[in-house]
Image (tube, helix red, strand yellow):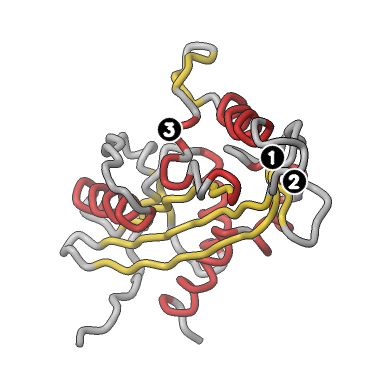
Amino acid sequence: MSSVPRLGNERLVIATHNAGKLREMSALLAAHGVDCVSAGDLGLPEPEETGTTFIENALLKAHAAAKAANLPALADDSGLSVVALGGRPGVYTADWAERQWFEGDKGRDWYMAMGKVEGLLCEQGAEVDRSCWFTSVLAIAWPDGSEAVYEGRAMGSFTWPPRGKMGFGYDPAFIPEGFDRTFAELELSEKQAISHRADAFRKLVAEQFPG
């Protein structure tokens, strides 16, 4: 059985055009001396996410970036799963945030997405179970086709109205277990200690940077 490939001294492409994800990933990797560059900075196209699981989509993005840049690439596929909604939006988390034009930039309307979740919960009544979790799958791909996958979770509850301005995506509506503040109200260092992405990163670091 072949061993898991390891990151070397090459630059690492962060396969995202999301500034928030890039900021978090770069900060988490900085302690290990990894030189990061984003797919957006390299002008790489965003591949269509045709997978039906977080793992499939993370690997799809990582391999596309590794092949295009001829460098190892790290991709994240993450999403929010709500118990009362049968795990939705799940892998389709980003799709619930329909693309809109904001000041000349075509981005996603995350407030709309959070509102959809809240609307569906409200339809089930005031006593609806608001427990939910974030999943993050980190996939590393190398130009030769090698790959490695790491998965993390953060449990919490969905709140309304959204609070805080320091997060991104659904962060303003997610209160992690053991806290009374949303992800978007936490300082970056606090979030990095408990987030789904941090959980996946701990597993990545243990294997990629042992000792």
Residue 95 bears which disc, if any? 3
35 vs 111, nearest the viewer: 111
Q: Which residue is mark 2?
A: 182
161 vs 32, nearest the viewer: 161
Lateral position of residue 27 relative to residue 50, left or right: right
Q: Quadrant of residue 173?
A: top right
Residue at mark 1 to residue at mark 3: CA–CA distance: 17 Å
Q: Earlier in the sequence, mark 1 or mark 3?
A: 3
Determine whether label 3 and label 2 are within 8 Å by CB: no
Q: Residues within 10 Å of mark 1 (few under 14, many from 20)?
A: many
Residue 173 bears which disc, if any? 1
117 vs 97, nearest the viewer: 117
Placement of 183 over or under 149, stated as above or below: above
Q: Amino acid at mark 3?
A: Asp
Q: Amino acid at mark 2?
A: Thr
Placement of 152 over or under 16, stated as above or below: below
